[in-house]
Amino acid sequence: MPQGQPAVVPDDGMTTRQRRNRPLLAVHTGPGKGKSTAAFGLALRAWNQGWPIGVFQFVKSAKWKVGEENALRVLGTSGEGGTVAWHKMGEGWSWVQRDGQDSNEDKAREGWEQVKRDLAAETYKLYVLDEFAYPLHWGWIDTAEVVETLRTRPGNQHVVVTGRNAPRELIDAADLVTEMTKVKHPMDAGQKGQRGIEW
């Protein structure tokens, strides 16, 4: 295992092992590509450790067939590694809020209620809340409630939240924040997403 040395060792009364193994809240945000991809990479590592994983997609429609879902579902039923449960709450809306999205708002709230139930029951060791920053940014779900729920979650449950425009309160509460920036993207030149790259 890599043996990196932290720049600071806090005087918090915890042992090195306790500090190393405390549950983390991670946020992947920003306008660049790769936020969900990074979260699914984390899920692969969690699967390899035998952790039960819950993926909650707050944007992608149940009709969409994405590669990460197929791969993690196959791995989750392989008998090796951890289990994987996959939940989709969206209708395929994107980071652009559209008119007439009441059903998506309701589905996002229902999804968050399920996450809260699973956190209380300690159902998973890793939660991937994919595109969850959007319903927070739009005010569909109360950010203060989310931060408090994640801050007081029981046990040793790790959570990663993805999506553009993550609220400042969530960023401040997180242990790990990565902002994906865009330098260049094929869409800038009029090229749409393609199989094997975007899904």
Image (cartoon, rainbow, N blue to C red):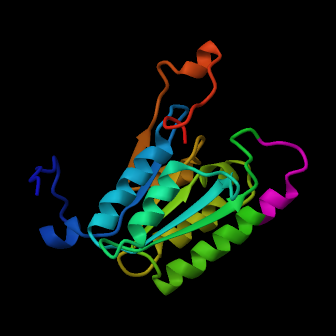
Q: Nearer the viewer, residue 1 or 139?
A: 1
Residue 189: say if magenta.
no
Picture mark count: 0
Q: Residue furthest top?
A: 189
At 55% from the left and 42% from the top, the residue drawn is: 199
Q: Position of residue 41 (x, y in %)?
A: 37, 51
Q: Nearer the viewer, residue 175 or 81?
A: 81
- Tell me if residue 12 can be seen: no
Q: Could you say where residue 16 lies in the image, as x and y percent from the top left?
A: 13, 67
At which x and y percent is residue 101?
85, 52
Where are the magenta residues, as a range?
97-106
Residue 75 versus residue 9 in the image, above or below: below
Residue 153 place in picture, x, y as percent: 46, 76
Residue situated in front as seen by the camera: 56 or 199: 199
Give 124 or 24, whichever is nearer the viewer.
124
* Residue 191 against residue 148 in the figure, above or below: above
Q: Quadrant of residue 63?
A: bottom right
Q: Is residue 147 visible?
A: yes
Determine the residue positioned at 45% across, 82% down. 122
Is 103 included in the stretch rendered in magenta?
Answer: yes
Q: Quadrant of residue 14?
A: bottom left
